[in-house]
Image: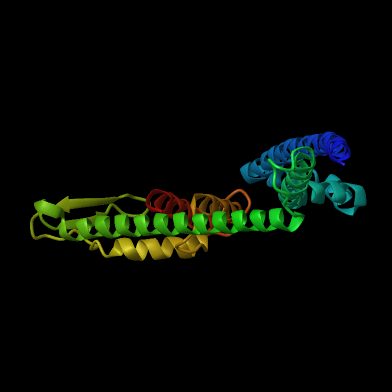
Amino acid sequence: MNLINKTLGKILYIIAKAIDAVFNGTIRLLETLIMIIKGISSGLFLLLSMGGCLFFFLFAIPLGIRILTDPYALAVIFFFLFFPIIGGKFLTQLKKQKFLVSSYLFNLSNHLISPGEYTYKTFSTYKQTFEQAEEDYRKEQERRYYEEQQQKQRAWNEQFHQWQSGGAGGRRYYYHTGSGGQWHHQQGGSQSFGNSPTNYQQKYKESLQLLEVSEKADQNQLKTAYRKKAKKYHPDINKDPNATKKFQEINDAYKFLSEYS
């Protein structure tokens, strides 16, 4: 019986190695494909954001209509748009199945070969282990995010307090150089140059409203929101008389939030 179990264990070990190799190859292939498609999609998006959209509508309208009415062309467009998302989710599930199947088969084969050295574990045991690891990772990410937000809030409060009090050198007064100008401050004395430091908080709220993001938005979310707004109000695309002013406000809001978020 021991000889039979060891033989079965060795055969199962070879099968487990082959299955693990197939999983690894598929995962690497999918990761490479997702990376390539993401790169192409990012390049196309950058081209459109730099004015390619205007060129498309002005000089290639017949071609554009032909593409939009061609089911194969639409399929390619949707592939480039949605494959990175769907592929990423599938990749996550594939890695999970690799861990579960490979771990279970290797454990079973080792248990058959050396039952005294390796304790048999059921498939559900590995599933529970993986789910617990996922839960621990999620909690760790939430903890880090909470700590980062707390640090940002403390830093913002400290900086805002310094701007209000002016530190050891006395109170600071802020003034603006005019439309499109920069904020400046003068420390000490009793004269105020225009707006008070409390307008910093108002500018922060207005910048969030301009880009339509929340206070919890990270740098990637800010960049995505900025690109969407900038594309909408770019003077080369939007012919509204107020588009240039709106575009400048969006740029200022993004620069402000990027520095203090």
Q: Residue at x 25, y 50 (%)?
A: 184
Q: Front-most of 250 and 84?
A: 84
Which residue lies at the image location 47% right of the left edge and 65% below the top edge? 209
Is residue 180 among the parts visible in the rendering? Answer: yes
Residue 70 visible to the viewer = no
As rendered, which of 27 and 241 lies closer to the eye? 27
In the picture, measured across the screen, residue 187 lies left or right of residue 111, that is: left
Residue 113, position as x, y percentages in the image: 78, 37
Vertical placement of residue 173 versus 112, above or below: below
Where, by quadrant of the figure, is residue 174 drawn? bottom left
Counting from the top left corner in percent of width and height, residue 202 is at: 35, 66
Residue most extreme to the front: 1
* Residue toward you, 91 or 246: 91
Give the residue drawn at x 23%, y 63%: 196
Q: With 50 as the anchor, is 154 left or right in this view?
A: left
- In this rendering, would 205 be left or right of 196? right
| Residue 133, above or below 28 | below
What residue sits 54% from the left and 53% below the top? Answer: 226
